[in-house]
């Protein structure tokens, strides 16, 4: 991006987009499985207790997650199934809650999920639920100010893609 445009954009952001006040937008953003996994690979630190992570969006607001604990290829890949249990309710509850659906591995999966509590900040595990704090993640990656302009965020899945629906405005 041209540095002059970037400076202009940063000034607008710092001023709360005052010169664009009243703008509204609704966006439907499908994110392919490939892009989702590339983004995860780029954002998960090398020190994470998991490796070989792959998320497969399934129809009906579900995901299959495959990963290894540690970096050893001797240990088999684990597979868990997750479903969206609660959508974010902006601005009061910027958290998406995922429910563990893998019943056969429940006794193994819950301790494994607790290990994941350290990766990344903003993700917590309570019983069979994973809470993903979108505000914490956005702020960690420098996007917190943009979240302030969203009135609605829906996360749905179809086979092979996560579909985000965002509705926002500049106040």
Image: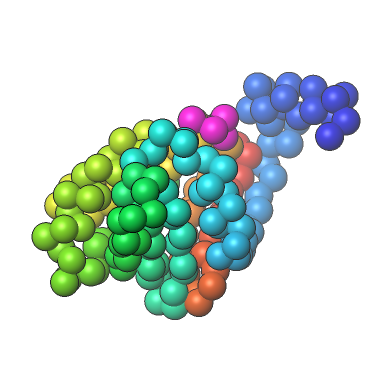
Task: Name the image quarter holding the C terminus.
Answer: top right
The quarter of the picture where residue 10 lies is: top right
The residue nearer to you, when weighing 21 against 57, is 57
Does residue 69 show up magenta in the picture? Answer: no
Does residue 142 show up magenta in the picture? Answer: yes
| Residue 109 in the image, given as x and y percentages of width and height | 20, 58
The residue nearer to you, when weighing 78 against 120, is 78
Colour convention: rainbow
* Number of disc labels: 0
> Image point 66% across, 53% down: which residue?
25
> Image point 17% across, 71% down: which residue?
103
Task: Name the image quarter holding the N terminus.
Answer: top right
> Image point 24% across, 69% down: which residue?
101
The stretch of residues the image draws in magenta is 140-144
> Image point 47% across, 41% down: which residue?
44
Q: Main secondary structure of the magenta part?
A: loop
Seen as rendered, the residue at the extreme front is 74
The quarter of the picture where residue 143 lies is: top right
The answer to whether residue 26 is left or right of residue 163 is right
| Residue 81 in the image, given as x and y percentages of width and height | 31, 68
The quarter of the picture where residue 18 lies is: top right
| Residue 6 in the image, given as x and y percentages of width and height | 80, 28
Reply above or below: 48 against 13.
Answer: below
């Amino acid at each position: 991006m041209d540095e002059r445009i970037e400076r202009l954009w940063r000034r607008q952001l710092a001023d709360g987009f005052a010169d664009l006040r009243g703008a509204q937008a609704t966006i439907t953003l499908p994110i392919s499985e490939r892009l989702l996994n590339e983004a995860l690979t780029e954002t998960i630190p090398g020190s994470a207790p998991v490796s070989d992570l792959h998320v497969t969006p399934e129809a009906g607001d579900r995901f299959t997650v495959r990963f290894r604990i540690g970096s050893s290829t001797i240990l088999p890949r684990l597979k868990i199934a997750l479903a969206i249990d609660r959508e974010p309710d902006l601005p009061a509850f910027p958290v998406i809650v995922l429910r563990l659906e893998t019943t056969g591995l429940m006794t193994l999966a819950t301790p494994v999920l607790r290990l994941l509590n350290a990766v990344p900040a903003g993700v917590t595990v309570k019983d069979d639920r994973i809470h993903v704090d979108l505000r914490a993640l956005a702020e960690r990656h420098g996007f917190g100010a943009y979240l302030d302009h969203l009135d609605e965020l829906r996360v749905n899945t179809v086979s092979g893609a996560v579909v985000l629906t965002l509705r926002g405005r500049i106040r």
